[in-house]
Amino acid sequence: MFIADNQPPPYENVDLFGSDRALVEAARINGAEAEERALSVFGRRWGTAAMFDAARRANDDPPQLVGDAGERCVAFDPAYHAFMRDSIAEGLHAMSWRADGRRAPAPAEVARAARFYMVAQVENGHMCPVTMTRAAVAALAAQPDLLAQVMPKIVARQYDPDYRPWTEKPGITIGMGMTEKQGGTDVRANTTRAVRDGDGYRITGHKWFMSAPMCDAFLVLAQAPDGLTCFFMPRFAPEGAVNGLLFQKLKDKLGNRSNASSEVEFADAYALRVGEEGHGIRTIIEMVQLTRLDCAISSAGLMRAALARALHHVRHRIVFQKRLIDQPMMRAVIADMALVSEAAMALTLRLARSFDLAPGDAAEAARARLLTPAVKYWVCKSAPAFVYEAMECLGGNGYVEDSVLPRLYREAPVNAIWEGSGNVMCLDVLRALKRDTEAARSVLAALLGDANGLPGAEAAARWIVSILTGADSERQTRAGVERLAQLAAAAALQDMRSPVAELFARVHLAEARGAMFGTAVLGAADVAAMLDRAVPD
């Protein structure tokens, strides 16, 4: 049905789970079948017009730093707090942990990933403190006594934005500060200093980028006498006074507008050590591994959100006396995008399954180590171009702020930059290969087994090994890591018995294709099948 002015009706009141056939199948095959009813309830709630409108308000009214220089806090639009309450009430910040800090049993990671993927289709900014709070537990495990103190506050499903000591609150959120202006990714160049003060430390220095300054505590890196060390820094000192965190400004970011990111000076700030002195990178990397997984899930969700809007538009818009969805070239573009979107989702949920199984399965633990940076690299770096193509499907309608596409487009680059940019991810893949070559080769063999019989899979596996283990491996690592992620995506699609696994492998592993969407060689039947699977009814 078409309305008189040839404009599509609003995209709202969508079941983000039930209308996404591929997501339902991926959740089921990755162990979360028992969660389907709860996931459907979640998907219907998050797909309402009210949720979409709240996301607009949270981003149109970004946070502000208020108060005196020595005691500043962050003020948000009420919509932001509503998202935080909802996500924490659902357990997105802690459902993958037991109350004692051990991993929750499978399928906790997959069930959470499916929810996180749906939330990403609505509002991304508030997911930053949610994901950091969840991931902080992995780092805090290096200090069991401290973990035991904070864990009851982390697993609580109560959001408390009040500005008071964390010990007085029913539930808390945790942020992170690693980056300094002189070092950036090279955290070994950090100059922030920590000196012993009784049972704690006093920290002096700065952070050029510290995420979520409204959190109750932060994991930060500073140079202790024995080297770079991880610390737990609360907003309030033990005696109840405001701690020495002097927030200088909020970053004026391209996207991610609803979320606060800050520059901060530490003036003799009180903190507790997490792990041994000199082991800061080893400690914090446990947290970063989980935030990288969430970056990939979030980017896959952004891609699905953009695809859904493009599909909604072209199914209702008439051009040259035909619906756009009936125009052959547009069909090819949308089908090509749908193929990549499904692959990204399948890949991230399969990776979440590896995290679920890793504690008791060495092969899955090795898979998570090797593939997390590769998956983040490919999915997160694919998102900006993907969202742009969706924007172009809407034409001028997609370029104006009345559409959600400009916000999605501004949001899309952030996950590729945060938690390690593209080159860092590629170097991490190389390190994983060199640190445990036998385990890495076993992962590749398992991927090839999962992708058994798919076009181009065997040749891709041989090529990946030759590129990533060659004498000139670092210069060519991006090519090898991209192909590694695509092989893993084909294997994930095959594993979930997706009818498009062979098509993805043919298009992305076996055949040459152009750089733009719509250049894959897809038959009419392939296009029709992809569009049928992707349509968000």
Image (cartoon, grey):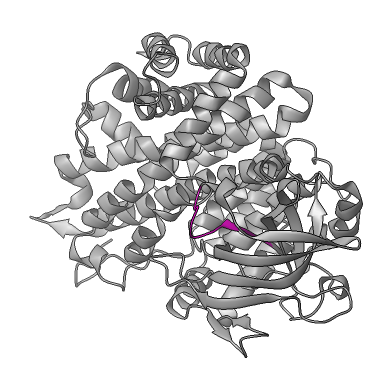
User: Where residue 531 appears, x then y in whole percent?
Assistant: 33, 39
Q: Quadrant of the N terminus?
A: bottom left
- Residue placed most toward the observer, 158 or 47: 158
**Residue under the image location 47 percent in, 81 percent down:** 61
Q: In the image, 536: left or right of 43?
A: left
Residue 408 drawn above or below residue 158: above
Q: Dividing the picture into quarters, in which one does residue 160 lie?
A: bottom right
Give 323 or 115, whichever is nearer the viewer.
115
Count of numbered tags: 0
Relative side of 450 to 439, left or right:
left
**Residue 261: image location, x then y, percent:** 53, 68
Residue 99 location, x and y as percent? 87, 50
Residue at x 44%, y 65% (from the top left corner): 12
Residue at the extreme left of the image, as rendered = 320
Left of 499 or right of it: where is 274? right
Q: Position of residue 148 (x, y in %)?
A: 90, 53
Tell whether position 248 is magenta. no
Say if 450 sits above or below 287 in the image.
above
Q: Between residues 405 and 164, which one lies in front from this camera angle?
A: 164
Residue 179 lies in the magenta stretch: yes
Magenta-drawn segment = 175-185
Q: Write down the quadrant of residue 151 in the picture.
A: bottom right
User: With respect to residue 487, does 531 lie above or below?
Assistant: below
